[in-house]
Amino acid sequence: MQILTHPFEPFFDENAKILILGSFPSIKSRQENFYYQHNKNRFWRIFEILYDCELKTIADQKAFLKTHHIALWDVIASCKIKNSDDKTISYAKANDINIILKKAKIEKICVLGKIASKYFAKFYPDKDFLELPSSSPANMSYTLEKLVEQYRIIKER
């Protein structure tokens, strides 16, 4: 396995108040050049339900994030990973989230999944964050309804 480098920039502007961090983009997301593009990942479906909207295209998704002051990035800048399986991540190096924290007024950091949370806590032991369950199709212990309930905290200010 070769070391892969995160292929795209964080998505945010200076109005972002919530930072959502995943682990590392899936193969499909790397191909599409944006976050959570695997059709079985429930990330965008969760937000469609929470905000009663449709997020079918990347343009829709980007407009939604800006409207709701949400920044999106990943904890890991580079790593070895087999396919898109977070459990196989090794040799992980951190993304510098201070790029976002210096420019935006982030009030809440949400990290998605146990592996992303483990690396976030390792890379940023001084930062408070909320761990939310992964929206990945591999996380079958959470139904879509349970995910929506857990992610509702993102809407709370």
Image: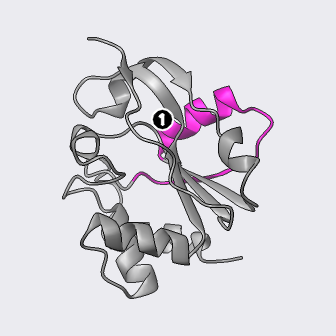
Residue 102 vertical position relative to residue 150 in the rendered view, above or below? above
Q: Where is the C terminus found, in terms of image quarters?
A: bottom right
* Residue 9 % position (x, y): 47, 43
Side of 22 where 124 appears, left or right: right
Q: Residue furthest right?
A: 126
Camera-nearest residue between 54 and 142: 54
Residue tagged by mark 1? Answer: 115
Residue 102: in magenta span: no
Q: Is residue 80 visible?
A: yes
Residue 118, quarter of the rendered image = top right
Q: Residue furthest bottom?
A: 52
Camera-nearest residue between 125 and 58: 58
Q: Where is the N terminus found, in terms of image quarters?
A: top left
Residue 96, quarter of the rendered image = top right
Q: Is residue 146 visible?
A: no
Residue 119: in magenta span: yes
* Residue 84 % position (x, y): 26, 34
Q: Residues within 10 Å of mark 1 (few under 14, many from 20)?
A: some
Side of 100 where 127 appears, left or right: right
Q: Give the amino acid type for the residue marked by disc 1 in the picture.
A: Ile
Please, what secondary structure does the residue beneath circle 1 have? helix
Residue bounds of the magenta highlight: 113-134
